[in-house]
């Protein structure tokens, strides 16, 4: 019987089916972070249990770490207890910690693929909703809650009802300065916040095949914002070349064996998906959000919509307009801004920083605008500095931070001020997400950089 790639990976990791109808799926590796892992460690300690496979588990300090140079635990006092608890719980269970000062420290979804910890066809679990970021490499990754995490740590399996399958085919080619972030925002706008609910999504088509691995990860990162359970791109030769030689990747004969298996990881030609969508990417312009959820999206040349045009969501859209301080018909391009943030697990890899630096090189941010760049990992930071990108950003008036989640959710002290309008490369524009009463517009690194220079939301293509 023809199978989707999701079916193949799921079935290969199926341990058993529970009486309640949920499947037990083996998890190959999992990565923890300091906001939720300490609670799971505490649960295990109360139960008198330890992590049986610490070699398959890794701890990241990313959500609450300060991004200021020379940082210590106390640089962000509100996060210090989380950092200490993460170290203690990890040490108690023999788990490696990617801690402050570690040359590979960074955001879990950035570090895991860049060190080769996540591999095609593997399963992966993270106590964070954006776990499916690593699906860009062809892995099946799931976010989990604290109680669920404790179960995974103790048993190496996750209990889940089998999701449905969806394929989103992205046809055509992306134009200049149009990125995976723009494609992802377009998909969420088209399908809505619940468009992928209950599904694992396979992204396919010529536009996806042309994306670099980092772009594919951005695409999969935003899968959760349309309710998807997970999302991935089938691996190809570009994937294998990207993984080769990374620290945790197979070596020698094991590499040859792995590669032979990875080449089989594709959906059968006549496989049937529960849901399919086709989107033409030809002529797509840079996208940006106007409201308070990631489906509130228009093209950069668009205008704020009129809630009256959508009676079912009218009250919600009117609330979003009120929070954002906007009126129907307002052009997005030209809207004055106060702050720009370039970073997060969505857009803080080296190609993201290179794209932003190419826009700001030789220019300076507008008067009154505050701008911050935070690399997604210490490895990305070193690579960017080796290329002189830090100097490009500093010369343009940007602050250059140490790696971490930073302003994505503001859990480390990096926040906007009430009423500020922010262009951000992150994944969520919810009310108060980047600070109390802040107004966030999601965009690509190139659009964010152009907006910082212009002092208003800008179409990077005009520069």
Image (cartoon, grey):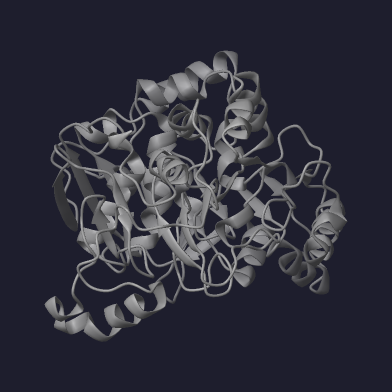
In the picture, the quarter occupied by the C terminus is top left
Question: Outermost residue toward the bottom?
Answer: 315
276 or 457, nearer to the observer: 457
Q: Quadrant of residue 161?
A: bottom left
Please, is residue 243 above or below residue 62 in the view? above
Please, is residue 190 above or below residue 346 in the view? below
Residue 180 visible, this angle: yes
Q: From the viewer's perspective, tell me whether residue 38 is left or right of residue 215.
A: right
Question: Outermost residue toward the front?
Answer: 367
**At x 60% / y 36%, what residue is drawn?**
117
Q: Position of residue 341 (x, y in %)?
A: 53, 50
**At x 44% / y 22%, what residue is drawn?**
240
334 or 115, nearer to the observer: 334
Please, is residue 236 above or below residue 62 in the view? above
**At x 61% / y 30%, what residue is drawn?**
395
Residue 11 visible, this angle: no
139 or 192, nearer to the observer: 192
**At x 41% / y 44%, what residue is drawn?**
454
Disc count in the image? 0
Q: Position of residue 207 (x, y in %)?
A: 23, 34
Question: Outermost residue toward the top?
Answer: 252
In the picture, the quarter occupied by the N terminus is top left
Please, is residue 112 above or below residue 199 in the view? above
Q: Position of residue 5 (x, y in %)?
A: 30, 42
Q: Position of residue 428 (x, y in %)?
A: 45, 61
Q: From the viewer's perspective, tell me whether residue 107 is left or right of residue 25.
A: right
């Amino acid at each position: 019987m023809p199978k989707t790639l999701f079916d193949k990976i799921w079935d290969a990791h199926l341990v058993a089916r529970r009486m309640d109808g949920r499947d037990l799926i083996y998890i190959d590796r999992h990565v923890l972070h300091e906001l939720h892992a300490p609670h799971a460690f505490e649960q295990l300690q109360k139960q008198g249990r330890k992590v049986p496979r610490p070699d398959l588990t890794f701890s990241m300090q990313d959500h609450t770490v300060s991004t200021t140079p020379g940082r210590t635990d106390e640089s962000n006092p509100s996060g210090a207890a989380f950092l200490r608890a993460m170290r203690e719980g990890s040490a108690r269970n023999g788990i490696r910690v990617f801690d402050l000062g570690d040359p590979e420290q960074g955001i879990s979804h950035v570090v895991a693929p860049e060190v080769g910890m996540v591999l095609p066809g593997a399963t992966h679990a993270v106590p964070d909703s954006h776990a499916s970021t690593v699906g860009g490499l062809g892995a099946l990754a799931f976010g989990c809650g604290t109680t669920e995490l404790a179960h995974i740590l103790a048993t190496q399996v996750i209990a889940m009802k089998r999701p449905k399958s969806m394929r989103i085919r992205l046809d055509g080619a992306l134009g200049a300065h149009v990125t995976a972030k723009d494609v992802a925002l377009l998909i969420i706008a088209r399908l809505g916040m619940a468009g992928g609910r209950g599904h694992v999504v396979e992204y396919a088509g010529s536009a996806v095949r042309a994306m670099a691995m980092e772009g594919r990860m951005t695409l999969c990162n935003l899968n959760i914002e349309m309710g998807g359970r997970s999302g991935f791109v089938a691996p190809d030769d570009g994937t294998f070349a990207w993984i080769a030689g990374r620290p945790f990747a197979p070596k020698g004969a094991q590499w040859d064996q792995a590669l032979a298996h990875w080449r089989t990881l594709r959906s059968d030609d006549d496989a049937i998906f529960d849901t399919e969508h086709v989107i033409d990417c030809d002529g797509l312009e840079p996208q940006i959000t106007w409201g308070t959820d990631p489906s509130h999206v228009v093209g950069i040349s668009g205008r704020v919509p009129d809630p009256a045009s959508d009676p079912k969501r009218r009250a919600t859209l009117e609330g979003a307009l009120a929070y954002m301080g906007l009126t129907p018909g307002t052009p997005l391009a030209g809207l004055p801004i106060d702050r720009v943030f370039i970073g997060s697990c969505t857009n803080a890899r080296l190609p993201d920083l290179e794209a932003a630096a190419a826009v700001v090189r030789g220019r300076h941010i507008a008067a009154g605008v505050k701008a911050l760049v935070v690399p997604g990992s210490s490895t990305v930071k070193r690579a960017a500095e080796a290329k002189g990108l830090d100097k490009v950003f500093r010369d343009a008036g940007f602050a250059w931070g140490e790696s971490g989640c930073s302003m994505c959710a503001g859990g480390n002290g990096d926040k906007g001020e009430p009423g500020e309008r922010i262009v951000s490369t992150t994944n969520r524009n919810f009310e108060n997400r980047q600070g109390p009463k802040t107004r966030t517009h999601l965009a690509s690194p190139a659009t964010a950089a152009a907006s910082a220079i212009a002092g208003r939301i800008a179409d990077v293509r005009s520069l």
